[in-house]
Amino acid sequence: MTGTRQVLFIQGGGEGAYDAWDDKLVDSLRRELEDGYEVRYPRMPDEGDPGYARWSPAIRNELADLQDGAVVAGHSVGGTLLVQTLAEQPPERGLAAIVLIAAPFVGRGGWPGEEFELSGDLGARLPDGTRVHVFHGLEDDTAPPSHADLYARVIPQAQVHRLPRRDHQLNNDLSEVAEVIRLCHLTS
């Protein structure tokens, strides 16, 4: 797929998330990005009980198949596990951007972690020069909108996008996410 820009979308957790919830987000992203983009949407193992030990190897396998300049995005706990995976072991190829969508913050001030907590220097542990965008709906009743501020604190280079009247699924509308992805590719 020469000339095609890649986007890797990591689903959120919960029973049925892949087929009943996050597929709508991926449909929106594909529709908004149109031609010239390949949106990869792998099914994560044991979606009803997401965890770092199970999902991180699957995420690493997906990262290994990306070309230079890909965008990686994760929704909800998928975003949390994606960013932790990237901090623990950056991919071999360069990324255009990391996009977190309604991602709960696991660590000080956020949710307690059983397997890990995001470090206070998370931004320094992410791939050098990679743009980071954090999207959060202000009507999110799953992951509190204040979690976006916690990400901003530990990833100082992150650009936070607070979306009014949007829920945990961003009302199944990723038009703002698609716009940021297009801009990242134009300037990379």
Image (cartoon, helix red, strand yellow):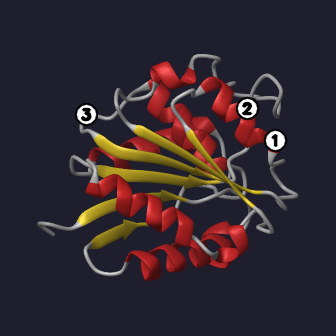
Three-letter code for the amino acid on which mark 2 is drawn = Leu
In the rendered structure, the answer to whether residue 87 lies left or right of residue 163 reads left
Q: How many marks?
A: 3
Give the residue number, with chain letter if any, for mark 3. 92
Separation of residues labelled 2 and 3 (CA atoms): 27 Å
Quick one: which residue is furthest to the left in this view?
Answer: 2
Mark 1 and 3 residues: CB-CB less than 8 Å, in contact?
no
Separation of residues labelled 1 and 3 (CA atoms): 32 Å
Mark 2, other Cα within 10 Å: few <14 / some 14–19 / many ≥20: some
Residue 127 appears in view? yes
At 57% from the left and 17% from the top, the residue drawn is 121
Say which quadrant the N terminus sits in: bottom left
Mark 2 or 3: in front is: 2
In the rendered structure, the answer to whether residue 52 lies left or right of residue 61 reads right
At 67% from the left and 26% from the top, the residue drawn is 153
Give the residue number, with chain letter if any, for mark 2. 150
Separation of residues labelled 2 and 1 (CA atoms): 7 Å
Point out residue 53 in the picture as x, y percentages from the top left corner.
Answer: 58, 35
Location of residue 21 with respect to 137 vertically, above or below: below
Mark 2 and 1 residues: CB-CB less than 8 Å, in contact?
yes
Give the residue number, with chain letter if any, for mark 1. 146
